[in-house]
Image (cartoon, rainbow, N blue to C red):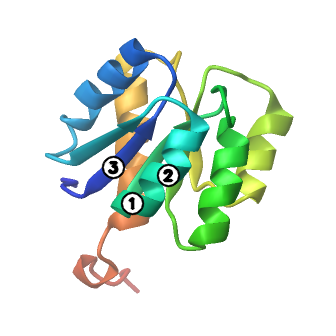
Amino acid sequence: MTFNGKILLADDEAHIRKFVALLLRKVGSPTLVEARDGQEAVEAYARENPDLVLLDVSMPVLDGIQALDRIRRADAEAVVIMLTSLTNRQTIEDCLRLGAVGYLRKDLPHPELLAELQRLITENFENPEATPPPAT
């Protein structure tokens, strides 16, 4: 699947934003909006109305969980994928409970991270009418 929508990428580390932006170019030609902290992410979401949000868990001002909560309260249909290098199961469960559609481990090898990103995008943006019905 090729994804050409608008993506909000929020991470406090510039090198991570650059790395993820490179991965996103492998899944299509999305328009990218960047934020450096959770507060910027919430403001950018309201201003830009992106199709997809990639949100780091650990950020200053507002952390990713707080930003996720505010984004989802403002738009219950927001598609948010969390980015994390944490393996804390409780944090991941909290994000999923608040409405994140999934999470990406930033420390995965490139090919695995790209495959997981593609899988999450396909699951959330594939046109169901284009999918043939299952064989019976």
Task: Look at mark 1 in the image and give the residue it sits on.
Answer: 47
Q: Earlier in the sequence, mark 3 or mark 1?
A: 3
Q: What is the crowding at mark 1: few (fewer than 14 residues within 10 Å), some, or many (at least 20)?
A: few
Task: Look at mark 2 in the image and give the residue it sits on.
Answer: 43
**Mark 3 near mark 1, Cβ–Cβ under 8 Å?**
no
Task: Look at mark 3 in the image and give the residue it sits on.
Answer: 7
Q: Which of marks 2 and 3 is nearer the N terminus?
A: 3
Q: Is residue 53 positioned above or below 62 on the image?
A: below
Query: Which residue type does callout 1 highlight?
Result: Arg
Camera-nearest label, 2 or 3: 2
Inter-mark Cα distance, 2 to 3? 14 Å
Q: What is the crowding at mark 2: few (fewer than 14 residues within 10 Å), some, or many (at least 20)?
A: some
In what quadrant of the picture does the C terminus appear?
bottom left
Q: Where is residue 29 in the image (x, y as percent from the top left)?
A: 14, 46
Work out which residue is located at the far right of the displayed protein and give it. Answer: 90
**Mark 2 near mark 1, Cβ–Cβ under 8 Å?**
yes
Q: Which residue is drawn at 37% across and 35% down?
A: 115
Inter-mark Cα distance, 2 to 1? 6 Å
